[in-house]
Image: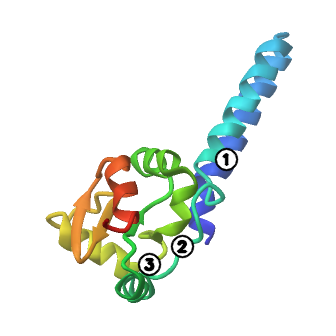
Amino acid sequence: MMRAWILPVLLVLFGSAVAAGQFLKGSPGTAAALLPVFVLLAGVNSPLVFPRSIGALEAQRRSAVDGRPVVYWRPGCTYCLRLRMRLGRSAHRLHWVNIWRDPDGAAVVRAANDDNETVPTVVVAGRPHTNPDPAWVREQLCPSA
């Protein structure tokens, strides 16, 4: 759990230091502009943006039952963030596995990507897809007509 918060906390601390430095230099406007930027970056990279992660084995079990895709991701990944943002409200319908918190999930991703932990890796009907287009992932949620 703590590992997921390291980057956001560092961004807030660094942003606070930079803003304080600007304020002490006599640039309160710059400080006031910089701090919200770093806080926003911290928020975007925090676990709060993504739906609650579950373990890989549980995600695979649920996917077998309901047919929904499994998304393997990690905090700080810009491509994962892009996928999450582009999916919008549909994101909660997927099964999300944080590979930094789940060694089984990391093993699935390595097996699908030539021993690399390339995310997002989306598994649909047992087939992995590395960094797929968000529109395609959304289509996988719609039942076939």
Name the residue type under label 2.
Ser
Task: Determine the image quadrant of residue 97.
Answer: bottom left
Q: Is residue 73 above or below residue 53?
A: above
The residue carrying pointer 1 sits among few (fewer than 14), some (14 to 19) or many (20 or more) residues within 10 Å by Cα, namely some
Depth order, front residue of 133/101 = 133
Name the residue type under label 3.
Asp
* Mark positioned earlier in the residue sequence (2 or 1): 1
Q: Is residue 18 above or below residue 8?
A: above
Q: Are marks 2 and 1 in contact (CB under 8 Å)?
A: no
Q: Which mark is residue 102?
A: 3
Depth order, front residue of 43/145 = 145
> Under tag 3, what secondary structure?
loop
Farthest-out residue, top:
26
Residue appearing at x 68%, y 38% in the figure: 40
> Under tag 2, what secondary structure?
loop
The residue carrying pointer 3 sits among few (fewer than 14), some (14 to 19) or many (20 or more) residues within 10 Å by Cα, namely some
Residue appearing at x 23%, y 67% in the figure: 128
In the shown orientation, is residue 83 left or right of residue 32? left
In the shown orientation, is residue 130 left or right of residue 3? left
Q: Which residue is mark 2?
A: 53
In space, the residues marked 1 and 3 are separated at their CA atoms by 22 Å
